[in-house]
Amino acid sequence: MPFDLPSAALLPSQFFERDTVTVARELLGKILVSLADDTLTGGRIVETEAYLGPGDPGSHAYRGMTPRTSVMFGPAGVTYVYFTYGNHHMLNLITERDGVAGGVLIRALQPLFGIEEMERRRRGVPLKDLANGPGKLAAALGVDLRDYGIVLGHGRIAVYDAPPPPELIAVSGRVGLSRGWETPLRYYLQGNPFVSKGRTGQPRNPAASGSEGASE
C-alpha cells in the first residue's frame, strides 16, 4: 500500500499514555520504521499483543519492578527490547502513565521500506515471511539491545501516524506463553497475509523457558 513517509507525523507520547489495550488496537495500521545501520527499513503494523502490569501472569511486570523491567513502569512512548530463546530480540512499546506498567509487543509488520535490506538481514526469505513474527520483525529491522529504553522518534526507532486500517481487527489469545496465554490480548488485521503464523488458543509447554511477548 502506498505511504508517504516524509509527510507523515510521528505519533506523540500522548498516543501511548493511554491504557495498553487501546494502544495495542490502535497501533494496527501505523507505520514502524528503524534506522539501524543508517538504513531505513520498516512497514505497516499488522499484529500486536498487549502486556499489562502486576495482575497479568503473562507479563514481565507480573512480579513487580526489576532492573530489566523498570522501563515498563516508566514514561510511555519508550522502547522495551529484550533477548529471548537465545537468539531472538523482541520489540515492545511502553504504554500507560508514568508508574503504571504496560507495553505492546509488535508481533508482525507488512514491509514497505528497505525491503532489500530486510531480505539481506533475513537471508533471503520470502517477502511475506520477512517480519511475520516478533523475532523475525526485530531481525528484519535490525533491532537489538542497543534499542532498549529509547524514546520513540529520538533514536533508531519511530512510529508514524496513518489512517485507520480498512481490514477488520481480529482478537485472540496471546502466542507462546506458559501462563496468561488464554487472555484475548492479541490483535491483528484479519486476512492480512503478513500476520504471524503463531498458534493461539493453546498454552506453551510450561516447562519451557522464555516467551515471545513482554512476558514471564
Image: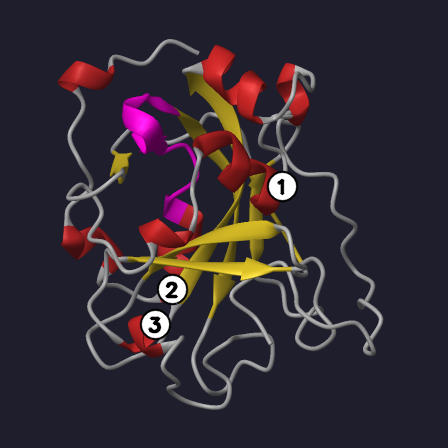
Instruction: Using the image, determine if residue 187 lies above or below residue 46.
Output: below
For label 3, the residue is 72
Q: Earlier in the sequence, mark 3 or mark 2?
A: 2
Badge 2: few (under 14), some or many (20 or more) residues near its Cα, within 10 Å? Answer: many
Q: Which mark is residue 70?
A: none
| 206 magenta-colored | no
**Taking the image as drawn, is residue 34 in sight?**
no
Instruction: Using the image, determine if residue 62 lies above or below residue 93.
Output: below
Q: Which mark is residue 133?
A: 1
At label 2, which amino acid type do we have? Thr
At label 3, which amino acid type do we have? Met
- Label 3 vs label 2: CA separation? 11 Å
Q: Is residue 185 left or right of residue 141?
A: right
Quarter of the C terminus within the rendering: bottom right
Look at 74% across and 46% down and name the residue there: 198
Q: Is residue 92 left or right of residue 190?
A: left
Look at 16% across and 53% down and name the residue there: 13
Q: Is residue 122 left or right of residue 151?
A: right
For label 2, the residue is 20
Judged from the image, the secondary structure of the residue bearing numbered disc 2 is helix
Q: Residue 126: x percent and y percent?
A: 69, 16
Q: Earlier in the sequence, mark 1 or mark 2?
A: 2
In contact (CB < 8 Å): disc 1 and disc 2 = no
Q: Residue 54: x percent and y percent?
A: 46, 87
Q: Is 46 in front, or is 84?
A: 84
At label 1, which amino acid type do we have? Gly
Magenta span of residues:
26-41
Q: Residue 72: x percent and y percent?
A: 34, 72
Q: Residue 128: x percent and y percent?
A: 65, 21
